[in-house]
Amino acid sequence: MPSYRCRALNHSLGHAVDFLIETLLAAPGEITLVATGPLTNIALAVRREPRIVPAVRRCIIMGGAFRHEGNMPLRGEYNVWCDPHAARIVLHSGLPITLVPLDVTYRCLFREADMQHIAAQADVRTPIVRFLADATRFYIKYHKTAQNIEGCAINDALAMALAFAPDLVTTVAL
Amino acid sequence: METGDGPAHAATCADFWRLTGRLPNMHVAPEVDAERFMRLFVTRMIKLANG
């Protein structure tokens, strides 16, 4: 198992739900919230302190699958599948949401050729390149085996990119 | 989102044809400039790695 150095978690930050509430209320209208996992903590935060809803500038959520086959049994998408009740609470909360479903993330495939290009242009000894190579090796193999797809969908990276490049996608109100 | 335990567990449902009369409650991204995003991702990774 490869190891990567990273900054230790700062446990003094407390519980994630408290952190969300305190941080959002301290900077109303300034924070874009990007959710790249199950929505449990955000749902709890909304339920505990509804005043965070108008305080969020924008909420980008990687989740859901509309016309896509899904990545969990029976057309489910992993983040929603883990806690659909939380997803329902968040999506109906009134937060200014941009939902980034598998329908678009599966069009953004990172292929072995991309990794080779990065390795040729960058220092392959750096943690970021080693991590990218290690993480995508498994992920590409999984996509090939499970879904017969060449490359891997970099779902979360697309959601994060929309925080500073929103015009990468077109959106519709639903 | 379907919250039941049946075969549609966690399925994403949307009123694409506006048949329910409900107001929209989010923006959904159905289209992406995938080529531009991948170019952005790859160049940012190279830049990050090279400091």
Image (cartoon, coloured by chain):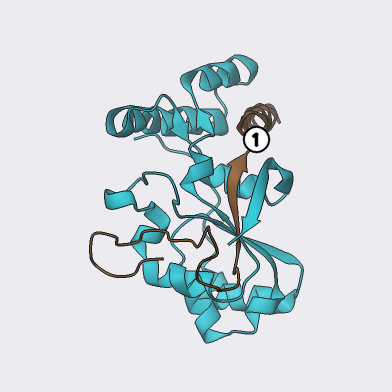
Chain colours: A cyan, B brown
Q: x and y percent of residue B32 in the render?
A: 62, 39
Relative side of B10 to A169, left or right: left
Q: Residue at x 52, y 41 (%)?
A: A105
Q: Is residue A153 above or below residue A56?
A: above
Check disc 1: other Cα within 10 Å, few if <14, some if 14-19, many if 20+. Answer: some
At a point 64% along the width and 29% down the height, the residue shown is: B49
Q: Quadrant of the N terminus of chain B?
A: bottom left
Q: Say if A163 sits above or below A149 in the image.
A: below
- Residue at the spot 71% in from the left edge and 65% down from the top edge: A31
Along the viewing direction, whichever of A10 and B4 lies nearer the viewer:
B4
User: Which residue is situated farthest in the left direction here?
Assistant: B6
Pick out the residue farthest to the top. Answer: A120
Q: Where is residue A144 in the image (x, y as percent from the top left)?
A: 33, 27
**Could you tell whether A42 is left or right of A160 in the image?**
left
What residue is pinned by disc 1?
B33
Q: Residue at x 35, y 59 (%)?
A: A81
Residue A40 visible in the snapshot:
no
Q: Quadrant of residue A114?
A: top right
